[in-house]
């Protein structure tokens, strides 16, 4: 019952053999449409002054919604970056609470990470990867402590970008995951860009998934704009992790269709032609067309999904707009579980000076 | 100038006087540094085609080529570690860390390598590296985009640290730093990037030590970076109440100009130091203690510190609760003026 | 004790009194912490089979199993980042960094993650992590094995920092830290590992704030970690000249016990602070400024700092030139005693 | 003439086709015997109090001497760890100056790194890898500036251990080297152990060389106890780097026959049987036997080599023993190229207090 190093079997992971049912695909389409609408709207919110900034995810709907679909949100745990709005929605996170980070209400968001099993927005590139490994190792330890077999483990899923793959922490995380065989899915959204730097100037060798082999981790590269492929890849990865066989690298090739953030100007580093050429088919149109072609969906149903999305966006916008700033006293309240005399004094002085100013 | 014979560049460095915003002044300093020293290099995340997220390196890659102004992969330890090797190869790297808070992954390279290589090699491998870093808060940025890191660097033997407070200083201090044979951390007050000012290219003035940004005889306000202009505003407000505040722009945070501090406070006999970083173990403690050491006999009140609180820099909507605002600085001034020996 | 029902362990924690060296006292504290809290874990480089390069974790893996006391790959960011995840999963990690100077690669995880997670999650994901670190100089170690990092951690909001100066304190402060729900940096004075002392397991005494290690009425010497015993020696020497030195063992470096400092110096009216780290922007500035803020009216001289110099910690053969030795501390005392208001 | 990312061709590198001549092998044997003798003696010096500590390299003679043999020390540059005494000797570094770091005279050693093209001893695991990449990139820039072709570049060689491979900096260095195609040889001495942690608990996947592929770097794994194989692997690597094709990973499998350092007690984590089983053939005996069997060497020549080594050790020991501490004033002198007023004041106070103490 010791936790020692046995490198996992290496190699390419096969997609989950199970194809998705039409109703599953329709549910995914609904989610993708909802987050597309919310995402596009959030850019408008920024222009309207409702939120000071936002990091759009347009183009990555299939990758995000599809990867969450492979998880069991009652026991798995998700570690997002700052661009996982679609994942947050699919995971069931309250969207007004989630948006609080972009509203500058609270860094990381106001959602409860324990309740939603979805950690706060991470602004430090690659900062969470080792957390996902540590948390997953904790699941192994829990099973050991409770005398359970290591064959049905809760898994962690860590999102990272092509840019993030350059950080030392990613390497340390993959190596730790390999040595401790933690149930961790490294889910790379290779969206072609890290702000202005294209993947080919970022990822030597050209693929993050290919690095898995160096750590004894099986990996799978997948078309990140094909939601069914994403779900099947992520399911295979999660199944592998759950089984106690260790971590997996999934690389979803997709495209950041929008700017890096609302303060970015992509025109400075890529042309509209580049975008048209490189973006590939729109993941939403593609899925809708496929379902329509298979007679599983009608045009009017699609219109309904967009209408639902618009209604959801409106509710969310109202909640976000109504969100007032948090009381300043919370600055002092949440630094520690057990506060300190120094902090109490500073809080008292702050209160006094704010009252008298 | 020996550099003239080395340079293959055609343009000349700037002369005359120009009205420039701080970001443009820094851009000009980088261009002139690259112009003057063909071994100067600019590297970092998005500094090339994009010209930096704050456009500080705008146009430099076009002008000096992708071999002298280049994007790196997204890894701060990588950027600084690579700079060490480039310095060993005879170059003068001017790396950019995209935001203050993303310097943390590079702390190991900065503290254990850059700061110590000259010492370790007994001067054989100097580290002429000018590390630029958009710094401090004030623009309601996301988490870890508003850090004040002077407390960290000012302690590290082997580093020098400077923060300009206006375009003229920014231009000349950066030009100066880019010719220094030692590593310099150049902390740019990002909230002032769009502040304009007159840059006299021919007359740098004294680039060492602190400068008196405003004279006054009742009390010295010590500040650096973005807090200098806030302190100047406060001095205006205090003047309305008949309090003549001297504002000392510290500029160099390592080494600190103890004599400049002493000279000012010897006259005013009272001091308040202002910074954005949390109070405990912040650089304000060092400044206050230096003043106390030099002016103990004449000081009328303990030096007051008006600083950020001992909390993580909060989200944008709480930024103004956290940062020393005019009211808090005025309260601090009042405490010092009203102090009676207990 | 609620822990009793959780633990599957058979042994009991220590009672009574025992003569122990500092390293054995820390080992005992770790064993008892693991015994009491089945969710406590020890991890780091070589902490398992080897029992640590200083044998601090000796026998723990044998006793508690390789799942609770385990070696990690050689990566400090990895160790601390993994600890964050383990804390999120409900564990209380007690990571070791093998030597002070190798904490630098983990600064990003410590400052941006461990220190901020409770704040970021509004208390939902606390970080009960006890980071142990052999610290300070004094044993002529290779480069970067003698760093004093309190200046760094004491500034970081969200961390708590403590350094014990003797076996009794070490045992109880570590037991205490290992039950605290907040991250604690535990700085072990490695040059005192072999110093023996009596540990009373049943009577921890007050574990908060500073302690007066020796009473005196002419001057307060403030120190922590390894410098406490040096200051006690100096107090003996000063006593021969009729100078009664009070030695204040600061213990907690974040938060600092300002009241304890004020209480002592209010009586002695003079203070010298001693530390190994370089002087500029070292923790001595904070200590001195806190004293000045509280005792300005009664202080007879500016607080003196006797510290390491603003140079990288040098090689072993120069260590005694660098570290505050008895002579230098005595000179500092003399300066304070002889100070006359200018 | 821009320096952009074109991932190098990946794959296993072939050993240099040229077999070594007998006289080359004899020169290498002489070097190996010299450093073996010096290394064993240095442990004795520590016991005798001549030096306070030492990190033995016994077993790694072939790997170190062989890798240096592939370099042109008039233009390449070496980045050692703390265990490269054999490499330092082979590179021509003054051994008393080198040993100054172990004598605690000066951290990093007293040798001039520019003169010997051999950087100071690095105590930070993986701390130098990025320097080697930066230096090598500087060679590319030099060639560009001078209008030279990128086909005969000076190369950097960075030594790292199996343990070091876990550090984030190694990953960043390999990725940067891949993106910038720098003439860098990552020379891994996989000696089975990182202090008490065996490779299999350290290197997920089992091989550092295998990671090269993930960065588009060719790599070669080699028997690190076979000096000829090491030379041929390193020559192939250096040739590749020189040619402008980018960086290479060489992994020399060897064994740390001694303790980690003079304060280590390997008995706590490995048995003598383990050592006997895992160490493999002694690289020196093996080479000597081979040369003797081929009639290229006689027993008495071997004895002479050992006698020469003993004489060299004696000269070095005397120089090291005679080495006094450096003047304390040097602490202040070497912090900066341009000193500061604060430092001058501190130096003055130090001088005064030392004089009066
Ligand atoms: C440690 C760190 N360095 C730099 C940044 C600034 N930054 C924010 S996003 C970004 C690009 C990230 O690219 P990628 O990982 O591909 O994710 P994407 O933005 O494409 O989703 C950079 C450089 C940061 N947030 N953290
Ligand atoms: C950053 C850092 N962490 C920890 C250490 C302590 N340490 C020194 S050597 C060593 C093991 C290194 O193993 P490896 O890289 O395999 O090299 P080897 O000692 O086998 O030559 C460790 C953990 C260090 N010097 N630097
Ligand atoms: Mg990307
Ligand atoms: Mg090794």
Image (cartoon, coloured by chain):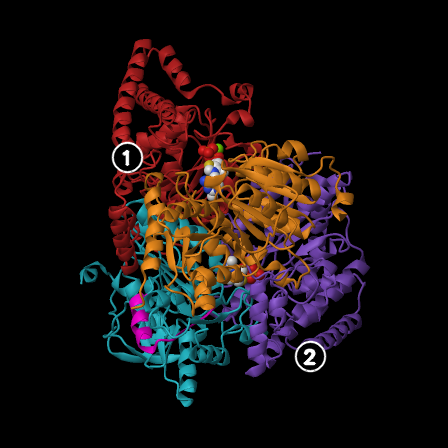
Chain colours: A purple, B cyan, C orange, D red
* Disc 2 residue: CB within 8 Å of ligand 1: no
Left or right of A203: which side holds C342?
A: left
Q: Quadrant of residue A43?
A: bottom right
- Which residue has dot 2 on it? A322
Q: Is residue B74 visible?
A: no
* Disc 1 residue: CB within 8 Å of ligand 2: no
Q: How many numbered marks have been drawn onto this rendered protein structure?
A: 2
Q: Is residue A353 above or below residue A31?
A: below
- Which residue has dot 1 on it? D97
Q: Secondary structure at mark 2?
A: helix
Do dots 1 and 2 share one subunit?
no
Q: Nearer the viewer, residue C87 or A265?
A: C87
Q: Nearer the viewer, residue C196 or A141?
A: C196
Q: Is residue D167 above or below residue C210?
A: above
Q: Which residues are magenta?
A: B257-276
Q: Quadrant of the C terminus of chain A?
A: bottom right
Q: Is residue B101 visible?
A: yes
In the rendered structure, find residue A71 and report the number of the disc placed on it.
Answer: none
Q: Position of residue B321 (x, y in %)?
A: 56, 75
Q: Is residue B269 magenta?
A: yes
């Amino acid at each position: 019952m010791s936790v020692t190093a046995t490198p996992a079997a290496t190699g390419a992971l096969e997609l989950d053999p199970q194809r998705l049912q039409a109703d599953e695909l329709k549910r995914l389409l609904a989610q993708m449409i909802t987050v597309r609408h919310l995402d596009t709207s959030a850019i408008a919110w920024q222009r309207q002054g409702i939120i000071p900034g936002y990091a759009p995810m347009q183009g990555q709907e299939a990758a995000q919604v599809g990867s969450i679909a492979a998880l069991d949100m009652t026991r798995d745990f998700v570690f997002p970056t700052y661009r996982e709005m679609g994942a947050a929605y699919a995971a069931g996170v309250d969207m007004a609470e989630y948006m609080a980070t972009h509203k500058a209400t609270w860094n990381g968001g106001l959602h409860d990470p324990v309740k939603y099993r979805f950690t706060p927005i991470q602004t430090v590139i690659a900062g969470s990867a080792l957390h996902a490994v540590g948390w997953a190792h904790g699941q192994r330890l829990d099973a050991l402590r409770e005398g359970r077999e290591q064959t049905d483990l809760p898994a962690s899923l860590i999102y990272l970008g092509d840019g993030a793959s350059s950080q030392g922490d990613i390497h340390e995380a993959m190596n730790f995951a390999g040595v401790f065989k933690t149930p961790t899915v490294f889910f790379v959204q290779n969206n072609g860009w890290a702000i202005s730097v294209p993947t080919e100037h970022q990822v030597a060798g050209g693929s993050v998934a290919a690095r898995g082999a160096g750590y004894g981790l099986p990996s799978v590269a997948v078309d990140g704009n094909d939601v069914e492929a994403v779900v099947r890849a992520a399911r295979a990865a999660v199944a592998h992790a759950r089984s106690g066989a260790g971590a997996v690298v999934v690389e979803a090739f997709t495209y950041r269709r929008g700017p890096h953030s609302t303060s970015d100007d992509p025109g400075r580093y890529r042309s509209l032609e580049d975008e048209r050429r490189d973006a590939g088919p729109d993941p939403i149109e593609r899925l809708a067309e496929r379902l329509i072609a298979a007679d599983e969906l009608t045009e009017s149903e699609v219109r309904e999904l967009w209408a639902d999305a618009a209604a959801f966006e409106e509710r969310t916008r109202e909640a976000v707009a109504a969100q007032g700033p948090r009381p300043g006293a919370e600055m002092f309240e949440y630094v520690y579980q057990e506060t300190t005399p120094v902090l109490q004094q500073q809080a008292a002085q702050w209160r006094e000076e704010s009252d008298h100013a | 100038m020996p550099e003239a014979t080395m340079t293959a560049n055609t343009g000349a460095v700037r002369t005359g006087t120009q009205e420039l915003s701080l970001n443009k002044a820094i851009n000009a300093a980088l261009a002139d540094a690259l112009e003057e020293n063909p071994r100067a290099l600019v590297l970092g995340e998005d500094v090339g085609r994009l010209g930096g997220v704050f456009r500080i390196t705008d146009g430099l890659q076009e002008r000096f080529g992708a071999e002298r102004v280049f994007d790196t992969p997204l890894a701060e330890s990588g950027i600084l570690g690579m700079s060490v090797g480039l310095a060993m190869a005879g170059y003068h790297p001017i790396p950019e860390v995209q935001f203050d808070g993303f310097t943390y992954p590079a702390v190991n390279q900065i503290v254990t390598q850059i700061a110590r290589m000259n010492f370790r090699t007994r001067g054989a491998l100097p580290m002429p590296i000018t590390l630029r870093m958009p710094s401090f808060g004030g623009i309601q940025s996301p988490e870890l985009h508003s850090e004040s890191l002077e407390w960290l660097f000012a302690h590290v033997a082997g580093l020098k640290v400077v923060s300009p407070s206006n375009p003229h200083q920014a231009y000349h201090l950066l030009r100066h730093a880019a010719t220094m044979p030692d590593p310099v951390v150049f902390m740019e007050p990002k909230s002032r990037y769009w502040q304009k000012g007159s840059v006299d290219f021919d007359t740098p003035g004294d680039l060492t030590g602190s400068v008196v940004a405003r004279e006054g005889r009742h009390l010295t306000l010590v500040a650096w970076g973005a807090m200098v202009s806030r302190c100047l505003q406060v001095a205006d407000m205090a003047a309305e109440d008949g309090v003549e505040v001297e504002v000392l722009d510290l500029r160099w945070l390592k080494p600190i100009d103890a004599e400049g501090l002493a000279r000012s406070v010897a006259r005013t006999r009272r001091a308040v130091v202002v910074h954005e970083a949390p109070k405990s173990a912040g650089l304000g403690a060092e400044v206050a203690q230096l003043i106390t050491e030099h002016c103990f006999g004449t000081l009328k009140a303990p030096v007051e510190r008006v600083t950020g609180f001992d909390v993580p820099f909060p989200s944008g909507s709480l930024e103004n609760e956290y940062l020393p605002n005019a009211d808090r600085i005025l309260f601090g001034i009042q405490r010092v003026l009203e102090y009676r020996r207990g």
